[in-house]
Amino acid sequence: MNRNSFPIRRRLLPRSISTRKSISFILAEYILASILFHVSFRFVMISCVLYFLLIFVPFNKRQNESNGQTKRIAYMYLIINTIVFTSLVFVFVFNKINITIGSFFFVTANVIAMYIYMITNFTVFGKRIIETIFYGFLLIISYLPLFISVSMSIWKSALLYFCALLIFIINVFFLKKIKLNGLTALDAISKFAKSWMDQESVAFDELLDKVGKRHVAKISVYHITNENDDSICTFIIPYIHPGPLRQIGSGELPSILYSALYDLNPFVVHGASNHSFNLTSRRESIRIVNLIRDCVKNKEDRGKELEKLSFSCGENGKIQISKYRFGENFLFFVSKVNSTEDLPNRVVCAVDERTDIVDRHNGICDENEAIYTESEETQVLELIALLKASQDREIKIREVGYGYTSFHTEDIGPGGIRVLSFFGSNNITFISIDSNNLACGMAQRIQQEAEKLGFSLSEVVTTDNHWNTGGKKHRLGYKPGGSTDGVGLLNAVKEALLMSKRNAQRAKFNRSVIAFETKIVGDEAMISLKKAADKGTLLVMLSFLSSAVLGLLVILW
């Protein structure tokens, strides 16, 4: 599915600002309004304080359980206040216009603001109707002195408010009736809106958990230690897709692994998986951290000395694969020529337990060419089988080194650049970039830099981190690594490679496989979610339009 986030995000509301900023803007608007309309500032401030007391101590006290909720309430009031204030200034400047137009603006704006306010709170619907009506009247009371000063028709405002509110309630009724896979459109809109405003994923994770399916996921961990059993590098292959986007689901899984496992020198790659294998919550990503740490900590077998590995590579059509053999374990790096996207998880299901498949995910020149077809998936499996049976080139290993640089830009995630290098009869390096794919040709440029530093074999991969997906104005819905500062990226890689040389030491190696039950959400569920959100958004727009038409009719009456 398209990686751009749901359309309701920008159509309905921006991200909320801090409570302090909201209150500051509101007070400034009240002061300016009292000056423009020659109303007693004390009278206006009494109304303002009354509204604040009531809106911050609502009927449903659960609304104030978190700072995020308080911030949202203040922000919603700012939206209401700003629209009403703008309408009053409009009337003040164009005083020849019929004064009831101000009433029309006020009530329509009020219904819109109440609608947004409602969808960002999650209580029993019946109580929300009562609160919506209640807050509407509070707003009228709050601005009563200003309405009196411009001789607005309070009765006409009240009539229009109730009529528009009736349309709003009818639309919400239909929103609750729209169901796709057991999901209502009201749920889809409200929980996405809350997550977007608060810049956190708890509400939307709850939604994904409802539509998610149980699945046994797998993570391979290659733990490389020195002679004292201290960690040189923890090579992590999660067969879980880091999506769908940002903090939602497993969108920031690589960032979480890098941050929480920093003491183990993590090296995260993209295990073969696509958008059918997104986790349903950030909570599950944190659970993975604990599983990996426990696995490394409680491992009884401290591993064997890493003295050699073997290498072979091959091509099959557009498919390019490298094989590295560590004892009885096979590690394959897979990609397509020039452009490569998510390698489906089913290829992993077709190989044995001793085999790991890393999706390089390291180039996007042609978006359509990057997608794996069924025949290409078959070619991948055929080439893997062929390489397993082929004669390998043995490479003696003397030392292993780990390096990193925290090169964090718009297109490179918090994990920066990680390097795992093997020094011996041939120098080999694995380079992982914490990004969602790489700009066209960037992987080849990185390999050339590695070759200049004496590495005859190099693997350039990305983590497919979705930390910036959906928020950048780019045709892909994200910025591939190296598209912002290619030269800076090359310099950062060079620095990490040199660091791995300085840190090189004798090493031991062991491999573990973690299997655990979790919930995943695939393309089908996300498409259903998007359809529900789209239909809900349409009804919201119709509600606004209906209120506007009704307002014109009342004005003409």
Image (tube, rainbow, N blue to C red):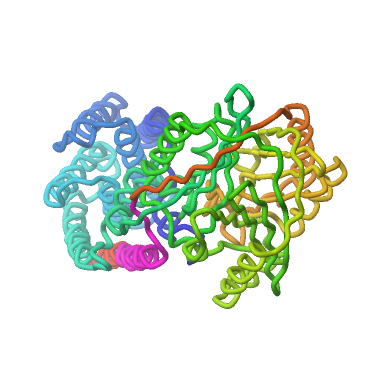
- Horizontally, residue 152 falls left or right of residue 289, namely left
Q: Residue at x 32, y 65 (%)?
A: 532
Where's residue 367, x and y in %? 63, 68
Vertical comparison of 76 with 168: above or below:
above
232 drawn magenta: no
Q: Residue at x 76, y 34 (%)?
A: 398
| Residue with the most extreme bottom position | 375
- The quadrant where residue 362 appears: bottom right
| Residue with the most extreme right position | 452
Vertical comparison of 271 with 385: above or below:
above
Whether residue 287 is visible here, answered yes or no, is yes
Question: In the image shown, does 532 or 285 lie closer to the viewer?
Answer: 285
- Horizontally, residue 539 falls left or right of residue 137, namely right
Vertical comparison of 419 with 459: above or below:
above
Whether residue 103 is visible here, answered yes or no, is no
- Horizontally, residue 423 falls left or right of residue 229, namely right
526 drawn magenta: yes
Question: In the image shown, does 253 or 75 lie closer to the viewer?
Answer: 253
Question: In the image shown, does 90 or 390 lie closer to the viewer?
Answer: 390
- The quadrant where residue 452 appears: top right
Residue range corresponding to the magenta coloring = 518-541
